[in-house]
Image (cartoon, grey):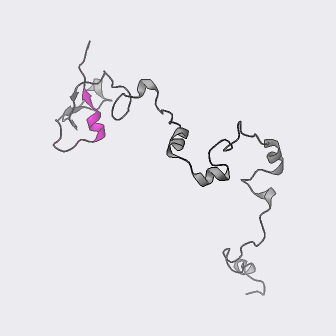
Amino acid sequence: MSEQGRGDDVYQPEGSDADNRPDDDLDPENVIDEPDLDEMLDTGYSPPEKPLGVSKYGTTGEEQREGESLDGRLAQEVPEDDPLPADRAADGPEDNGPEEDDAGDERAGRVAVTDEEPGAERNNRVLGRDVGIDGGAASAEEAAVHIQDDEGA
């Protein structure tokens, strides 16, 4: 072979990346997530509408030594906002919304494939028959299926 090195022998890095960590600090202008100085100046500062904690109990040394009474602490409590509107607050135990009147009262059983071949007029439908409720617990999908009367059919 010739005196020149092969392509694999030309550059072999020394050590791994774990050994070659940079020892200098990151340059703030090259950090991706951080806003640059111009953005920080444009953002500005909006002070709170009222001072925080100045009017609360315990800001003076005397109040800190005495301690706050339980009645004073309970008076500061603010009730949480109701996450549900008033018209949906008491719909049901699971809060899944109002119960639909469209669903029938009788639960359907399992659906199995029928042995009948679909006719030419039904070539895009799948035929099945109700084989009754299984002895075990039904899955959520099976329990959600109810029989509905055909009105006007």
Q: Is residue 111 left or right of residue 29?
A: left
Q: Using the rendered view, name the quadrant where residue 119 is placed.
A: top left
Q: Is residue 121 magenta?
A: no
* Residue situated in front as seen by the camera: 81 or 104: 81
Which contiguous range is marked in magenta?
A: 133-153
Q: Main secondary structure of the magenta part?
A: loop
On the image, the x and y values in percent for residue 103 come to 29, 24
Quadrant showing the N terminus:
bottom right
Q: Residue furthest top?
A: 152
Residue found 67% across the figure and 50% down from its top? 60
Vertical comparison of 128 with 54: above or below: above
How far across and down, in percent of the image, does residue 71 sit? 50, 42
Question: How many tags in the picture?
Answer: 0
Q: Which is nearer the eye, 88 or 47? A: 47
Q: In what quadrant of the picture does the C terminus appear?
A: top left
Residue 40 sits above or below residue 110 on the image: below
From the viewer's perspective, tell me whether residue 21 is left or right of residue 92: right
Provide residue 34's location: percent of width, then percent of height: 74, 53
Residue for point 77% across, 64% down? 26
Q: Is residue 36 left or right of residue 12?
A: right
**Which percent across, then down, holds residue 47?**
75, 40
Is 70 on the left-hand or right-hand side of 133?
A: right
Q: Is residue 141 magenta?
A: yes
The residue drawn where x is 34% and y is 30% is: 92
Q: Nearer the viewer, residue 14 or 37?
A: 37
Which image quarter: residue 131?
Answer: top left
Residue shown at the point (25%, 23%) measured from the top left? 148
48 and 42: which is toward the camera: 48
Is 28 rendered above or below residue 142? below
